[in-house]
Amino acid sequence: MIRPLSRLAPLGAVALLAPLAGCGQPAQLSVDHAYVRLAAVKGNPSAAYFTIHGGPGATRLLSVTSPLVVKSELHASMKHDGAMTMTPEAAVDVPAKADLVFAPGGRHAMLYDVNEAVKPGGAIPLVFTFADNSRIEVSAPVIAAGAPAPKE
């Protein structure tokens, strides 16, 4: 049976677009696996850990802040003469389409003077500001000093 072309055209369009449905969206700059470990000693800084997933272009992480924290700094931990040391970093390069992990023993955000209302089992908003004018806010679970990292 021969069908008129006008009835087959929509089927042809669907057939042409079907392979594109499997294509994913371009990589988006994002942050996940964030959590905050409170300081063991009151008055000492707490630490935030997270993973940044680079977007389509390279950028730089400029800051990690929170309305519940007075001050924050980006830090890198490294071994120097057999001892671990921390060095503040003004900004951190985020390569395109790559993951950048901030984890215990490595990079992290130091959080100074965390509001006393922040307790283990709760959450704290973290705002990530990037050089490409992106701002990402995440809600990070809060854990006690020495507690294992949250499972995700």
Image (cartoon, rainbow, N blue to C red):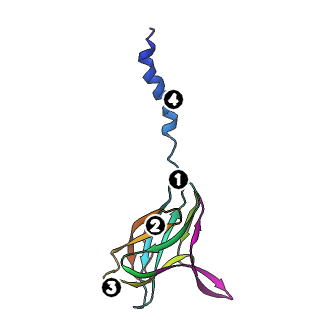
Write the start and end of the magenta stretch as one range.
72-96
Kindly identify the residue that appears in the image at 53 percent across and 65 percent down: 131
Q: Earlier in the sequence, mark 3 or mark 1?
A: 1
Q: Quadrant of residue 136?
A: bottom left
Residue at (46% x, 68% y) in the render: 128
Mark 2–mark 1 distance (CA, rounded to whole Å): 17 Å
Sequence-wise first label, 2 or 4 = 4
Location of mark 3 (residue): 116
Residue 33, numbered label: 2
Location of the N terminus by quadrant is top left
Q: Which residue is mark 4?
A: 16
Does label 4 or label 3 sit earlier along the sequence? Answer: 4
Quick one: label 2 or label 3, which is nearer the N terminus?
Answer: 2
Helix, strand or loop at mark 1: loop
Q: Are marks 2 and 4 in contact (CB under 8 Å)?
A: no
* Residue 90 on image: x %, y %: 56, 77
